[in-house]
Amino acid sequence: MGSIFNTQQVINGLQLGSIYALIALGYTMVYGIVRLINFAHGDFFMVGAYASYGAFYIFNSFLGKGTPLAIVVLIFAMVAGGAIATLANQLAYKPLRYKPKLSSLVTALGVSMFLEYFFSAFPLIGASPLGFPEIIHRATFKIGSAMIDNYVIIDIVVAAILMVGLTLLVQRSSIGRAMRAVSQDKDASKLMGINVENIITWTFLIGGAFAGAAGLLSGMTYPRIDPYMGILPGLKAFIAAVLGGIGNIPGAMLGAYIMGLAETFANAWNSLLGAGIAFIILIIVLLVRPTAILGEKTADKI
């Protein structure tokens, strides 16, 4: 038991939770404002990974491996994730905004499958997995009994910076105040002069950008990408959002880190248990506490 609950597993869980958190935030933001469970969100994560892959080979010869290249690749990943999310909103979700919710849900599944099969059929990509390049030289060092590489620190720090930035945006900016207003009452927001469609667009853009960043971090950490790589992380991030309280930003963060730690500890015990722990957690939450850890606080939604 001591070999499972150790410092190494905690660090690995925080690293995995950081990636889940960036994906889960997009789920919870979109649901908080549009009341849409966007099952294509995991594929925005995949698009970010492929954008990172392409950006590396475009800029590597100019910048060389290191921090400047990593920053440029991160920007490309976020732009690609945000762009595909915005495009999906405009072409697929906006026309169904005031239709029955089931229509939007089915459409989200259709967008997800379209992106997966489009990337599989694209000549320069294909369905076969690709090895992700080493954007920053990997270095390993020891802290106590744990072996940590610099990618662990990068994942946790980048995710923390983005999550703090999002929190400040939501709490202190005019866009954030408008998002909170729209999440509470769209009709009243319109009467107050808020352009609801613009706010929804911003929500998809930001959520997609975060998913794109997660795609880069995942590619660096687990150096293998393929067109279907977003399916399981997307589902697990959705469960993390449900666990914390979907529509609640702090809840999504908390749920993601709990999910990352639970999966890591379960994998240390048994790999099959690790693969299914997310779904076990979902069943338990729905049975024991349907309102999740932080509940469904309307005033805190976005």
Image (spheres, rainbow, N blue to C red):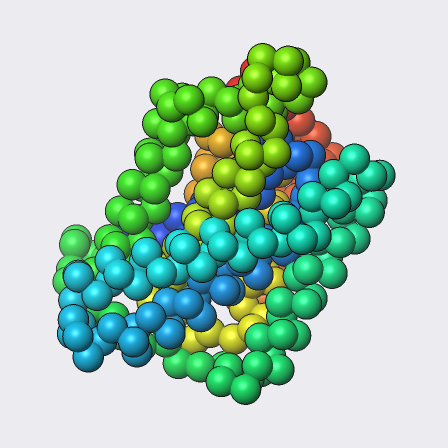
All told, the count of numbered labels is 0
x 21%, y 65%: residue: 69
Q: Nearer the viewer, residue 146 or 241?
A: 241
Q: Position of residue 74 (x, y in %)?
A: 32, 58
Residue 3 visible: no
Q: Quadrant of the C terminus?
A: top right
Tell whether 216 sits left or right of 112.
Answer: left
Q: Is residue 37 above or below residue 73?
A: above
x 49%, y 31%: residue: 249
Q: Is residue 18 above or below residue 113?
A: above
Q: Position of residue 280 (x, y in %)?
A: 65, 49
Residue 158 visible: yes
Tell whether 154 sits left or right of 32.
Answer: left
Q: Nearer the viewer, residue 107 or 295?
A: 107
Q: Position of residue 288 (x, y in %)?
A: 70, 31
Q: Quadrant of residue 253?
A: top left
Q: Position of residue 93 (x, y in %)?
A: 70, 47
Q: Is residue 59 above or below residue 33?
A: below
Tell whether 22 sits left or right of 113.
Answer: left
x 55%, y 52%: residue: 85
x 68%, y 60%: residue: 111
Q: Is residue 136 above or below residue 253?
A: below
